[in-house]
Image: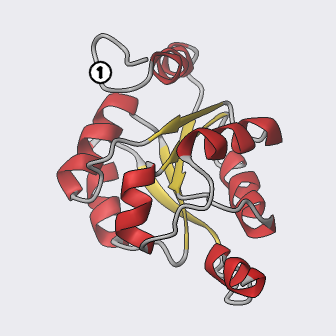
């Protein structure tokens, strides 16, 4: 369900407002998280260290198909959110808007959520754009995880074929 004053789900909107009210640092991580693996968990654990409250935005099924092609995601967005929630590493998990490919889409999200930190891996695309967007709201981008070329969801799925 969406919050009334924003396009954020209500539980995420409440979590963000509570974090700001209590002067707790809010950290945002976004990604596909299709087949959850150790590198995803390492990214999330390192992101958590950047602040007090960790929120994870999961790419929508439609967007994953645009990014990864037919046959993806392997797990639907509801299952991916549930898998992350079960891990207990994040304080809140939600599905990102389907239209989330342009800088203005990212700006809209961070303007509503107002994270102090956007935590990314070193392979995160459009880092300069993300830094500019976060600077507009007084936040910062932190590269928290090195890319491990040996592990990716695509490689894991290819091995299963």
Q: Horizontally, is 89 left or right of 81 in the view?
A: right
Q: Is residue 66 above or below residue 134?
A: below
The image quarter in which residue 33 lies: bottom right
In this figure, which colouring scheme has been used for the structure? secondary structure
Q: Is 51 or 56 nearer to us in this picture? A: 56
Q: Is 42 or 141 nearer to us in this picture? A: 42
Q: Is residue 49 above or below residue 109?
A: below
Q: Residue at x 27, y 59 (%)?
A: 101
Instruction: Provide residue 140's location: percent of width, then percent of height.
Output: 43, 53
- Figure disc tally: 1
Instruction: Provide residue 144's location: percent of width, then percent of height.
Output: 63, 65
Q: Horizontally, is 39 left or right of 115 in the view?
A: right
Instruction: Provide residue 147's location: percent of width, then percent of height.
Output: 64, 81
The image quarter in which residue 151 lies: bottom right
Quadrant in which the C terminus appears: bottom right
Q: Horizontally, is 88 left or right of 105 in the view?
A: right
Q: Residue at x 44, y 61 (%)?
A: 64
- The answer, for residue 56, to whether it is visible in the render is no
Instruction: Provide residue 8's location: percent of width, then percent of height.
Output: 38, 26
The image quarter in which residue 145 lies: bottom right
- The answer, for residue 79, to whether it is visible in the render is yes
Q: Horizontally, is 4 left or right of 19 in the view?
A: left
Tell me the crowding category of disc 1: few under 14, some 14 to 19, or many 20 or more residues within 10 angstroms, Cα based. some
Q: Secondary structure at mark 1?
A: loop
Q: Residue at x 74, y 69 (%)?
A: 39
Residue linked to disc 1: 6
Q: Is residue 107 above or below residue 1?
A: below
């Amino acid at each position: 369900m969406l919050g009334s004053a924003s396009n954020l789900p209500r539980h995420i909107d409440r979590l963000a407002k509570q974090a700001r009210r209590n002067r707790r640092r809010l950290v945002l991580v976004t990604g596909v998280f299709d087949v959850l693996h150790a590198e995803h968990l390492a990214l999330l654990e390192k992101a958590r260290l950047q602040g007090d409250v960790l929120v994870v935005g999961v790419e929508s099924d439609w967007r994953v198909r645009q990014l990864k092609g037919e046959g993806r995601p392997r797990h639907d967005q509801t299952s991916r959110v549930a898998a992350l929630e079960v891990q207990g590493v994040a304080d809140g998990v939600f599905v990102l808007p389907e239209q989330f490919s342009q800088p203005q889409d990212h700006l809209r999200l961070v303007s509503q959520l107002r994270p102090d930190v956007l935590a990314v891996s070193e392979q995160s695309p459009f880092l300069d754009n993300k830094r500019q967007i976060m600077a507009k709201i007084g936040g910062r981008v932190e590269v928290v995880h090195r890319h491990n070329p040996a592990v990716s969801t695509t490689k894991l799925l290819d091995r299963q074929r």
